[in-house]
C-alpha cells in the first residue's frame, strides 16, 4: 500500500482493519479509490479513503463495529451501475466492495428460490440458474449486483409482470452499523410474524444496514414467448395503447415505450432498421403456442384500433434477444451519440391510468424548451424516463434540463405517483422527499435512521438530506 495525504489521519484504524481482512484485501491506493469514486450517474465523484473487499459476514460485522467506534463513514459497493449517485462516498471514509462475496449459496429448485451473497452479479446468476429452468425476474438492464439491486429496489423491463426486486425478496441477512448481524424474513412465501424488517431494508440504499445475504423468489423460464414491435403516429397515442393493453387484462412480460429520438439512437446499432416513430416494444409468454397466439391477436387488434402504423409479432428468439440487448444498452448507446455532452436523467412513475398524461407532459416541456434527448419508459408499470443532453458549458441548456426534471416530478406527484420509480433517492432526489412523503413520514424516517445508525456512518448523505 502507498500512504497518501488523504488517509494520513486514518493511520490508527488501518492496522485494525488489516487485521480483519489481511493487507491484500485492503487498499488506500489512488487507483482503487478512484474506481470507487463515482457510479454511472452525472453526479460529482468523491474519493473514499479506504477500500476493503470482505469475504464473509463475520468480516463485515467486525469492519462495521470498528468503523462505528471510529465514526468512519461506510458505503457499500456492488457493481457501480446505479445512476442516481447511490454508492458515491460523498464523505469519503470506507467503501465495502462486495466483489469477492459473489457466490450462490443454495438453489432451492423445488421451491423456486435461491440464496446468494450480495456481490453476485444479476446476469451471471441467471446464467447459472438457467440449468434449473429458473430465473430472477427483476431486470435492471445492467449487470448489477444482487446487493445493489436489493439496496436500491431495482426494477426494469419485466416489472409489469413480475414486480420489482422488493416483490421478489423473501429473506435477508443484514449487518447493522453496530456490527450486529440479523436475519429477516423466511423462505415461506406467506409471512405474517411481526414487523416486516425485510422490506424495511430493501430500497434503503445501505443507509440502515448492509445486506450480506439474500433469499430471492425465482420464476420458471418461459417456454413459449414472442416479442412485438408496434409503431404509432404520436407518443401520446402510444401511451394510450399502453393503458388499453393493461386495461384489457393482457399480461405482458415487458412493455416499453420509446419516442422517435430513442428509436433513431437504437437504429445506430447494427442490424436495426426500425421505423423512426413512437414505438412500443412488448413481450408475451404463455403455457402453449395456441394461448400465446390468441393473446397476440388481441394485442394486434388493440394496436390497429389505435392508428398503429407498423406491427410485427412472432419475433424469433435471436431477434428478440437482440432487441432486448439493444434496449438494455440504450443508455450507453445514447452516450456515444452525444459525445462530450453532460446529461440529466429523470425517473418518475405514476398509476398506469395517468401514464398517458405524464408522457404528454414530458413531450410538451421537452419540445417547448428545445431539449436534446429522448423519452423512454417501462410503460407497463407507469415508469417514465427522459434523458437530456447538453454541452457542459451551456448554462441555459443545463437549466432547462433541471427544469424538465423538476416539472416531471411535480407532475408525477400531482398524478398520485413518485419522484423515483426505480433509480432510488441517492443524491438527486432528496429535495423531493418532503413533497412526496410529508413532514410526519420524513420525521419517522429520520427516527428509523437514528435508531439503526445512531452515529450516521452508513452511506451518509443519501436518501434523507442531513441539513433538512
Image (spheres, helix red, strand yellow):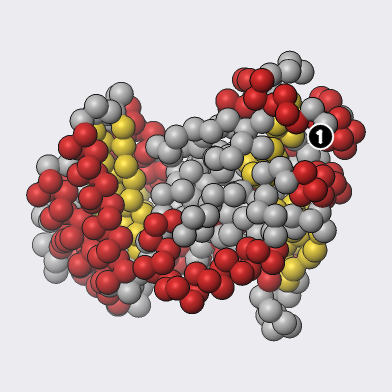
Q: Toward the viewer: 69 or 185?
A: 69
Q: What residue is drawn where x is 46% and y is 66%?
A: 161
Label 1 packing within 10 angstroms: few (<14), some (14-19), many (20+)? few
Is residue 337 positioned above or below 367 on the image?
above
* Label 1 secondary element: loop
Instruction: Tell me where residue 245 appears, x and y as whole percent.
Output: 29, 70
* Label total for image: 1
x, y (%) of residue 224?
47, 59
Residue at 19% from the left image edge and 51% from the top image edge: 278
> Residue 331 appears at what percent x and percent y?
37, 38
Query: Most extreme residue toward the right, as rendered?
Result: 19
Image position of 148 (left or right of 305): right
Q: Is residue 192 visible?
A: yes
390 w.r.t. 366: above or below: above
Residue picked out by circle 1:
13
- Image-quadrant location for residue 296: bottom left
From the top left corner, tell me how far across and down residue 432 is, in percent.
Answer: 38, 61
Q: Is residue 1 above or below residue 127?
A: above
Q: Quadrant of residue 99?
A: top right
Q: 97 and 410: which one is in front?
A: 410
Image point 27% across, 55% down: which residue? Answer: 406
Regarding residue 217, the answer to whether it shows in the image is no
- State which quarter of the image contains the N terminus: top right
Q: From the viewer's perspective, is 144 left or right of 100?
A: left
Q: Is residue 65 left or right of residue 344?
A: right
* Image: 462 above or below 49: below
**Residue nearest the viewer, comparing 186 with 89:** 89
Q: Residue at x 80, y 48 (%)?
A: 69
Amino acid at each position: 500500500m502507498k500512504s497518501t495525504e488523504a488517509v494520513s489521519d486514518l493511520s490508527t484504524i488501518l492496522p485494525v482493519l488489516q487485521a480483519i481482512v489481511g493487507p491484500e484485501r485492503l487498499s488506500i491506493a489512488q487507483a482503487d479509490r478512484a474506481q470507487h469514486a463515482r457510479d454511472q450517474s452525472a453526479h460529482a465523484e468523491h474519493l473514499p479513503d479506504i477500500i476493503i473487499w470482505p469475504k464473509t459476514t463475520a468480516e463485515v460485522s467486525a469492519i462495521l463495529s470498528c468503523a462505528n467506534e471510529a465514526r468512519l463513514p461506510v458505503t457499500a459497493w456492488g457493481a457501480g451501475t446505479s445512476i442516481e449517485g447511490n454508492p458515491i462516498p460523498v464523505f469519503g471514509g470506507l467503501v465495502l466492495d462486495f466483489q469477492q462475496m459473489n457466490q450462490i449459496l443454495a438453489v432451492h429448485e423445488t421451491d423456486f428460490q435461491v440464496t446468494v451473497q450480495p456481490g453476485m452479479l444479476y446476469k451471471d446468476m441467471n446464467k447459472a440458474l438457467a440449468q434449473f429452468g429458473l430465473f430472477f425476474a427483476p431486470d435492471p438492464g445492467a449487470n448489477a449486483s444482487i446487493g445493489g439491486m436489493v439496496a436500491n429496489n431495482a426494477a426494469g423491463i419485466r416489472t409489469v409482470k413480475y414486480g420489482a426486486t422488493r416483490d421478489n425478496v423473501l429473506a435477508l441477512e443484514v449487518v447493522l452499523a453496530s456490527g450486529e448481524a440479523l436475519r429477516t424474513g423466511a423462505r415461506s412465501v406467506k409471512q405474517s410474524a411481526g414487523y416486516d424488517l425485510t422490506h424495511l431494508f430493501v430500497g434503503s440504499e445501505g443507509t440502515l444496514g448492509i445486506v450480506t445475504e439474500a433469499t430471492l423468489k425465482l420464476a420458471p423460464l418461459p417456454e413459449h414467448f414472442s416479442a412485438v414491435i408496434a409503431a404509432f403516429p404520436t407518443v401520446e397515442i402510444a401511451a394510450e395503447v399502453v393503458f388499453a393493453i393493461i386495461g384489457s387484462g393482457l399480461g405482458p412480460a415487458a412493455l416499453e415505450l420509446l419516442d422517435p429520438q430513442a428509436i433513431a439512437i437504437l437504429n445506430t446499432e447494427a442490424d436495426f432498421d426500425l421505423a423512426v416513430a413512437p414505438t412500443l416494444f412488448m413481450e408475451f409468454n404463455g403455457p402453449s403456442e395456441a394461448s400465446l397466439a390468441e393473446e397476440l391477436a388481441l394485442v394486434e387488434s388493440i394496436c390497429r384500433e389505435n392508428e398503429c402504423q407498423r406491427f410485427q409479432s412472432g419475433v424469433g428468439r435471436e431477434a428478440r434477444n437482440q432487441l432486448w440487448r439493444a434496449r438494455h444498452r440504450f443508455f450507453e448507446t445514447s452516450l456515444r451519440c452525444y459525445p462530450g455532452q453532460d446529461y440529466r436523467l429523470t425517473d418518475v412513475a405514476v398509476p398506469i391510468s395517468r401514464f398517458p398524461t405524464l408522457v404528454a407532459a414530458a413531450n410538451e416541456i421537452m419540445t417547448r424548451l428545445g431539449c436534446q434527448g429522448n423519452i423512454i419508459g417501462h410503460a407497463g408499470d407507469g415508469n417514465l424516463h427522459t434523458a437530456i443532453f447538453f454541452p457542459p458549458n451551456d448554462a441555459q441548456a443545463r437549466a432547462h434540463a433541471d427544469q424538465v426534471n423538476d416539472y416531471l416530478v411535480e407532475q408525477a406527484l400531482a398524478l398520485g405517483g413518485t419522484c423515483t420509480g426505480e433509480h432510488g433517492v441517492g443524491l438527486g432526489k432528496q429535495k423531493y422527499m418532503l413533497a412526496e412523503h410529508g413532514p410526519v413520514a420524513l420525521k419517522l424516517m429520520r427516527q428509523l435512521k437514528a435508531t439503526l445508525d445512531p452515529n450516521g456512518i452508513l452511506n451518509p448523505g443519501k436518501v434523507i438530506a442531513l441539513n433538512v
